[in-house]
Image (cartoon, helix red, strand yellow):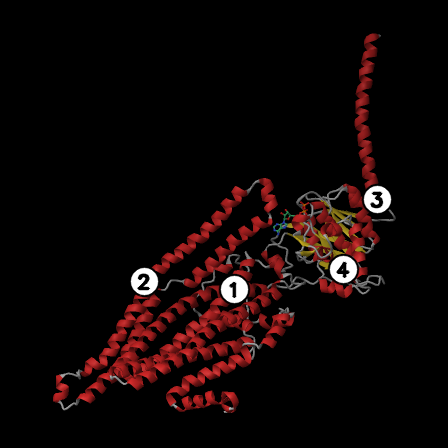
Amino acid sequence: MAVFSKLTSGRGSLAGERLLRLLKDPANRQPLLIFIAAVLIIRSSVIPSSKKRKAKESGIALPVLSEEELAGHARHFPLLPESAPAEPSAPGSPKPTLSLSFIHQLKSLLRIVIPSLTSREALILLAHSAFLVSRTVLSVAVARLDGRIVRDLVSADKWGFLKGLGWWFLLAVPSIYTNSMIRHLQSTLALRFRTRLTRYIHSLYLSSAPHLRYYRVPLQGVDQYLTADVEAWSESVAGIYGNLLKPSLDLLLFTSQLARSLGFKGTVLLFVNYYVTVKILRAVTPAFGRLASVEARLEGEYRAGVNRVGRESEEVAFYDGGPLERTILLRAYTRLIRHVNNIYKIRIAYEWTEDFVVKYLWSAAGYGVVGVGLLARGDKVGGDFFAKGGKEGEKNRVVADRTETYISNRRLLLSLADAGGRLMYAYKDLVEVAGLTGRLYTLLSTLHNLPSLPTPLPGDGNTFELRDVDVCIPTRTLLLGSAESKGHTTLVRALSLSLHRGTHLMITGSNGVGKTAVARVLAGLWAAGGGGAVVKPGAGDGEGEGRERMGVFVVPQRAYMVSGSVLEQVIYPLTLGEFYARAEGGLDEALGELQGILEAAHLGYLVEREGGWGTVKEWRDVLSGGEKQRMALARVFYHRPKFAILDECTSAVSSDVEGQMYEHAKSLGISLITISLRPSLTKYHTHLLTLTGDGTGSWTETGEQGGSGAHDLTRVLEEIRVLEMRLEESKKWEGRVRELEGALSVRS
Ligand SMILES: Nc1ncnc2c1ncn2[C@@H]1O[C@H](COP(=O)(O)OP(=O)(O)OP(=O)(O)O)[C@@H](O)[C@H]1O
């Protein structure tokens, strides 16, 4: 009551008095109280004040969930047999029906989007529910008022009619406010669900080592899951609540209201009507859930095709592959459209039945139900009414009362038919939500259940070692972390290596023998097979070098350019925030250091050419192949790792520049592991690993022994080459000598 006394004080006292007067009437009390409660909830907690909104807008952030928080959810996402990674086509395959497993899946996802009963989402849901209830109550009030107005009209009650009209306008205000708030809260809820789910999936999918889920997830078209599916699910789930709750409430309330005037028979008839409706619609409802799930998958395939052409546009253009790409895209599009068309066709029969049931069967049932009471009693208001002693005024009153009852009931019945229709649509939506829920659950349970890769041994921090490791092409199980190498194609068998800082290894061998595969095992992307172990140097300050150094930094074959500025290209994968935090001597000094690094990578001109460190461009397209490779080397110089794995990453750089960059890297104390086919690079290394590629997985290692090393190896190879050349030449001279001898013998 404190709220009301506040309302009645001061300027609002007149309005407050009126409000209290309205509340005294029991017929008005219920809808008004609900309406006021809903407005107060919204004002206090859901719609932020302008001050609050400003603060929120300036600080919109999506903090990453911690591994502990993610682990807390993991138990709600056990790997279902349908979504087990053994089934690559899993996303479309689980049959989404309204079964127990759907309820479990939905609950698991709802836990993410509504984390607690005091969360903002729960409050919005509460306010949404309050508005839904108040809308139903308002509908009943409107139906009753409708009846009263017509009654007063029929009985020519002028004042009653005007009063009714006044109430009509008064009720319009909360009604329209309620309707718009329901829509607003539903969209807000959908957006918040989407944000929560996106944040959760990103935290899980892009979590850093040791899981590298984004690299290992064995699902096709993950982008479709992350974008379209999340959005569609959030919209549907936020909508389905209202679409289910409102008509269910309507059904309950309208039926109870009707039951009062329809009597027993009418009420039974109403229930028979419900039963028949449900039976008919259940029989004709197609598997909308599965259809929606397949549609999402096909949409994903088409989308991935379009993305590929956009990404590789230059390559496609060089080959002039447009027509072929068009055929591929059209094929994917046709598959999608054919499926969507099928859904439309399947829907026709369903919608015919639905229309008939909702519009005609329900209305007919309505007339029947209203009429049954009156017709059954057979008490006409005709001539015999007076014969039985009825008076004129009484007749008018009876007619007016019946009109009121009829109008109110008819309105309630129409609303009831509408509620029934909505409920049917909601059922269809619910089945579609089941499809999307199945897909998202598959994604999350797959991500949660990716087993950890075996953790590399730490060693002394300055040694890189492979002990008896089989390098195997990853089948799904190996990719998921199994160290069991049986049944897999083994590229390199029982490989053992031990590299200390200061030594430099070159891995060579012909194409496809598994050089990059060895790098993947070294970097921890693939599990070491054959029960072997990897000893990997972690981050640290090395041997008293002052600055914290990364353990291992890999430069892959294809140079990767991140979206962002020139500066962000050099410091990748460091964020700008981390870069600033590191710049202890000030930003100018840090940028000066970066400029020096670019010069060492022969890219000193870049910052000036591109208009500054902050210039943002699509660097993948702007930089030449060689420039991209030099930028990748600049990253190595910036991070100064203990070990750098360079996978054919200077193939487009001229030999002299390549040599200078190698020397520079070594001068920074970086131990190099180079994968290359260029013999000219051997001279920068102390060890040589040759993968023979003879199908047995064998390999040979040449290393520093007693002062000799790869330098000797190069020298020996060179000497053999020179001797072979001389041998070749000597054959020519032998031929010439024989020619001359032949000529001499002819003369003599
Ligand atoms: N994810 C994978 N799934 C299946 N096969 C793979 C996979 N990755 C690599 N392979 C196969 O393993 C073999 C070795 O690949 P890898 O990339 O290590 O060769 P490489 O020696 O680096 O060759 P190149 O000199 O051409 O770069 C190849 O035959 C390749 O097709």
* Above/below status of 549 relative to 376: above
- Which residue is pictured at 32% across the width and 65% down the height? 355
Q: Residues within 10 Å of mark 4 (few under 14, many from 20)?
A: many
Answer few, some or many: residues within 10 Å of disc 3's Cα (few below 14, many 20 plus, some between 14 and 19): some
Q: CA distance from mark 1 to mark 4?
A: 40 Å
Looking at marks 2 and 4 on the same chain, the residue that comes earlier in the sequence is marked by: 2
Which three-letter amino acid code belongs to the residue tagged 4? Gly
Q: Which mark is residue 298?
A: none
Q: Nearer the viewer, mark 2 or mark 3?
A: 2
Local secondary structure at mark 3:
helix
Mark 1 sits near ligand 1, with its Cβ under 8 Å away: no
Residue pointed to by mark 1? 231
Q: Amino acid at mark 3?
A: His
Marks 2/4: CA–CA distance = 67 Å
Mark-to-mark CA distance, 2 and 3 = 84 Å
Q: CA distance from mark 1 to mark 2?
A: 30 Å
Alpha carbons under labels 1 and 3: distance apart: 60 Å
User: Relative to 732, is 279 on the left or the right?
Assistant: left
Q: Earlier in the sequence, mark 2 or mark 3?
A: 2
Query: Foreground residue, 571 or 435?
Result: 571
Q: Which residue is mark 3?
A: 711
Mark 1 nearby-residue class (10 Å; few <14, some 14–19, many ≥20): some
Residue labelled 3 has its Cβ within 8 Å of some atom of ligand 1: no
Nearer-the-camera pick, 451 or 283: 283
- Outermost residue to the top: 748
Read off the residue under disc 2.
352
**Which residue type does callout 2 highlight?**
Trp
Where in the figure is residue 597, as x and y percent of width and height? 79, 53
Q: Secondary structure at mark 1?
A: helix
Which residue is under mark 4? Answer: 551
